[in-house]
Image (cartoon, helix red, strand yellow):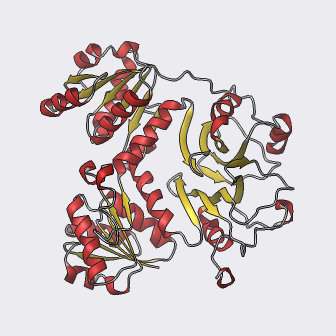
Amino acid sequence: MKVVICGAGQVGYGIAERLSQENNDVSVIDTSAALIAHITETLDVRGYVGHGAHPDVLARAGADQADMIIAVTLFDEVNIVACEVAHAIFNVPTKVARIRAQNYLVPEYSDLFSRENVPIDVTISPEIEVGRLVLRRISFPGATDVVRFAEDRIAMVAIECMEDCPVVDTPLQQLSELFPDLLATVTGIFRDGRLIVPHSADQLQTGDLAYVVCDRDHTRRTLGLFGHEEQEARRIIIMGGGNIGYFVARTIEEQQPRMRVKLIESDRDRAVLLADKLSNTVVLNGSAMDQRILMQADVQEADLVVALTNNDQINILGSMMAKRLGAKSTLVLINEPAYQDFAGTAGVDAHINPRAVTISRVLQHVRKGRIRSVYAVQNGAAEVIEAEALETSPLVGKALRELELPEGIRIGALYRDKTFIRPDGNTRIKAKDRVVLFASADAVRHVEQLFRVSIQYF
């Protein structure tokens, strides 16, 4: 596949890195010569210095032969125009744009980005995607990651196995026998810096991070089985009143009115605006690193501090200070990959990588076959994939124990007629089933083949 990426920042670099690793033909455009020099020196991609919305720059980058354009510059309007030019002049089949301003995305303008109006096939709002992820993490304390699939009926939960975890040293197959009515399957394990796609005879160990696919309604029970019975936060402090912080506070007001939320915003005008828009949230104007402001927010009584400013250092240091002053737990937004590696040792309880969220949304539209959703884990070492089985798929009709699945793939759940099915050796996949599976990076190409659309389908 030939892909043109407009924007060589953190998100653009991450997308280019994943696509180039999979032997796609990737061209990257950015106005910064330094960013282009860096990306071409470190990745197997072509770089072009210029404006991503200019026709001559797109032409030099090979837009006339491109299968997809992905516009992820810092400016919504550049992303929009780049997609329009790619459509009008170069007839690029698939156009993806990052849109950050929520004004473009309000429901009454839902038909704005359509082939008849502004021809963008996929819009990605990092703020909304990250905000939803934050809300899921708040709802399920004890989980280090929570993602939804299959019309929100299936959840993938990442759970750390602590020393008192009841299920360690137990073969995975035996877990199914011990808890036959629990709709959950362990599909992946991250251990000592290495990702493992387990077999039924494998066991979990203390310190493992287990990736479990379960029925949405069994999420809390699954966490409890792994020894995580933390209570949901009732007193929350949000650091940062940008788009993400506002989205989280507003959604909590709408869906969890019993939660007490206080929001700290450093810009006075923004703080006044948020105070007008939010009805039950206490808005404080000041720095998240100011001890007096934190004490004014009653940080010593906070169940959870969520740091969502656009500055990694403020998020990390502010959360560390909050923890020292008595906050029970912290959840921190961290953009810089180098900071993510030492977040745990710095006292950060959990962190969110917004770049990974955006990259996962893009991969969903890059993957071949009937791929409905993708979520990348451990910096792309594996993916949780939701795919639709077609009549021509080699998976259909045979019992799972009869299938010779490629190494690195483990099926976690089927979704059929709005019902969750926990797979076992006797399970048979039917056409139109949605299959949620865990696949190592090396096995993703096999997943695409298993769910490909063959000529017989037509």
The x, y position of residue 133, in whole percent, is 46, 42
The x, y position of residue 48, in whole percent, is 26, 77
* Residue nearest the observer in this picture, 8 or 260: 260
- For the point 26% across and 65% down, the residue is 79
* Residue nearest the observer in this picture, 361 or 187: 361
Is residue 134 positioned above or below 75 on the image?
Answer: above
Is residue 156 positioned above or below 238 on the image?
Answer: below
* Residue nearest the observer in this picture, 348 or 376: 376
The x, y position of residue 229, in whole percent, is 62, 24
The x, y position of residue 43, in whole percent, is 40, 71
User: In the picture provided, is 329 more to the left or to the right than 27?
Assistant: right
- For the point 70% across and 47% down, the residue is 420
User: In the picture provided, is 415 more to the left or to the right than 170?
Assistant: left
Residue 263: quarter of image: top left
> What residue occupies the far left of the structure in this picture?
269
- For the point 49% across and 37% down, the residue is 136
User: Is any atom of residue 334 visible in this view?
Assistant: yes
User: In the picture provided, is 186 more to the left or to the right than 86?
Assistant: right
- For the point 62% across and 62% down, the residue is 387
Quadrant containing the C terminus is bottom right
Total number of numbered labels?
Answer: 0
User: Is any atom of residue 343 visible in this view?
Assistant: no
User: In the picture provided, is 394 more to the left or to the right than 278?
Assistant: right
> What residue occupies the far front of the structure in this picture?
108
